[in-house]
Amino acid sequence: MNCILYQYIGIIHLGAMIFEDIYGFILGKNILLDRLYMIVFVSTPFSWIICKDECIVSYLMKKLENKQYIIGNEPENAKDIIDLFKNEQQYLIFYNLHNLLRMFSVSIVNKRTTTIHDLFFIPTCIFYLCYNYDITYRINYRKKVYPYFQIIFSLYLFTCFYKILTL
């Protein structure tokens, strides 16, 4: 595959992650944008569940690179982003910081606009982090409790999605 295209897509992917991290901190209340931001937050894990734990962008990059790639074979491999860092250690530092900032940013937006009750919002964030770390660090507890983890997480995501749409 074209190396430059691969890098550009990786940069866009990384840029989107950074934007997700800082959105709540740098932009003021905008009901439409805040709702879209929260829809993206809720939709991202749905895509992981549907795509066998893969980020759709990373999957498409893997498929372009290897036509034989089967979705879900290496969900922890976000090579399009990892390759942008000097080494995997730097990526993991970014990744952990990304997750921390993302949770704070999502919390800020939830408090100012969507106001999803903590009874639904906090478990959704916890499930989000558990799912994310489980994939990245290959802990695989989500596979041990399959499909219960995915079903319960999906119920929380559907509830949040419904709350966002019915504001």
Image (cartoon, rainbow, N blue to C red):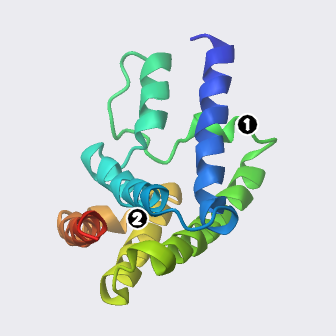
Front in this rendered view, residue 146 or 13: 13
From what the image shows, is residue 86 above or below residue 17? Answer: above
Residue 31 percent across, percent down from the top left: 45, 63
Quadrant of image for the C terminus: bottom left
Q: Hey, what amino acid is under mark 2?
A: Tyr
The residue labelled by disc 1 is 84
SS class, disc 1: loop
Q: Residues within 10 Å of mark 1 (few under 14, many from 20)?
A: some
Q: Earlier in the sequence, mark 2 or mark 1?
A: 1
Measured Cα–Cα span from mark 2 to mark 1: 23 Å
Q: Is residue 22 left or right of residue 138?
A: right
Q: Is residue 4 left or right of residue 61?
A: right
Residue 112 percent across, percent down from the top left: 50, 77
Q: Hey, what amino acid is under mark 1?
A: Leu
SS class, disc 2: helix
In the picture, the disc for residue 19 is none
Residue 104 percent across, percent down from the top left: 59, 75
**Please, which residue is most extreme toward the bottom here?**
119
Q: Quadrant of residue 127?
A: bottom left
From what the image shows, is residue 41 above or below residue 9? Answer: below
The residue labelled by disc 2 is 131
Q: Is residue 165 left or right of residue 134?
A: left
Front in this rendered view, residue 154 or 63: 154
